Image (cartoon, grey):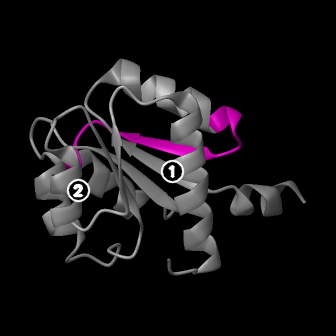
Amino acid sequence: MRGRDEENSMTILIVEDDADIRELIKIFLEADGFSVNLAGDGLDAFEELQAGPRPALILLDLMMPRMDGEQFMKQFRASRFADIPVIIMSGHSAAEKKAEELNAAFCLMKPVEVDELLKTVRQFALSGVKNDVA
């Protein structure tokens, strides 16, 4: 029975170069019942996608070294993972416009309130599972 529960726990991939922010979001999401994988940039995120369980949702920072969020999204949209919803998290003033250009599911402005983060993650992770199209 335990194995079945683990299969049903939804995985969220956090792609964020700031280790403190990554860990903090991970703590909140795990406390809310999600399974969490971490990546420090877009290259790490692709490695996670190839190796780990398929996430229900990706939380993506825009400003990162090696491969930033914009570069990640361009390659991601051409990959077999393109149907996974992506929520962009950024403190940059043009982030919402950029999220729209990159066809992201949503944009959360940093600093993100915990309640807003959890509500948004639940909304998009669960909608992906049910295959509902908004």
Report the span colored magenta.
30-42
Tell me: 77 left or right of 123.
left
The answer to which of 83 and 112 lies nearer the viewer is 112
Residue 35 is a magenta residue:
yes
Three-letter amino acid code at the position of disc 1: Ile
Tell me: 78 left or right of 132.
left
Q: Earlier in the sequence, mark 2 or mark 1?
A: 1
Residue 53: give x, y in percent of width and height.
Answer: 52, 61
Q: Which quarter of the image is occupied by the N terminus?
A: bottom right
Seen in the picture, residue 105 relative to 42 is either above or below; the reply is below
Between tags 2 and 1, which lies in front?
2
Q: Residues within 10 Å of mark 1 (few under 14, many from 20)?
A: many
Outermost residue on the right side: it is 1
Residue 72: give x, y in percent of width and height.
Answer: 18, 57
Seen in the picture, residue 119 relative to 131 is either above or below; the reply is above
Residue 119: give x, y in percent of width and height.
Answer: 59, 46
The answer to which of 24 and 36 lies nearer the viewer is 24
Seen in the picture, residue 43 relative to 127 is either above or below; the reply is above
Count the labels in the image. Answer: 2
Q: In which quadrant of the rendered view does residue 78 lie?
A: bottom left
Q: Residue at x 15, y 64 (%)?
A: 101
Q: Residue at x 30, y 50 (%)?
A: 45
Q: Residues within 10 Å of mark 2 (few under 14, many from 20)?
A: many
Residue 121: give x, y in percent of width and height.
Answer: 54, 50
Secondary-structure class at tag 2: helix
Residue 40 is a magenta residue:
yes
Q: Residue at x 49, y 28 (%)?
A: 113
Secondary-structure class at tag 1: strand
Q: Label 1, on which residue?
A: 12
Three-letter amino acid code at the position of disc 2: Ala
In the rendering, which numbered label is found on residue 99? 2
- Whole-angstrom CA distance, mark 2 to mark 1, is 19 Å
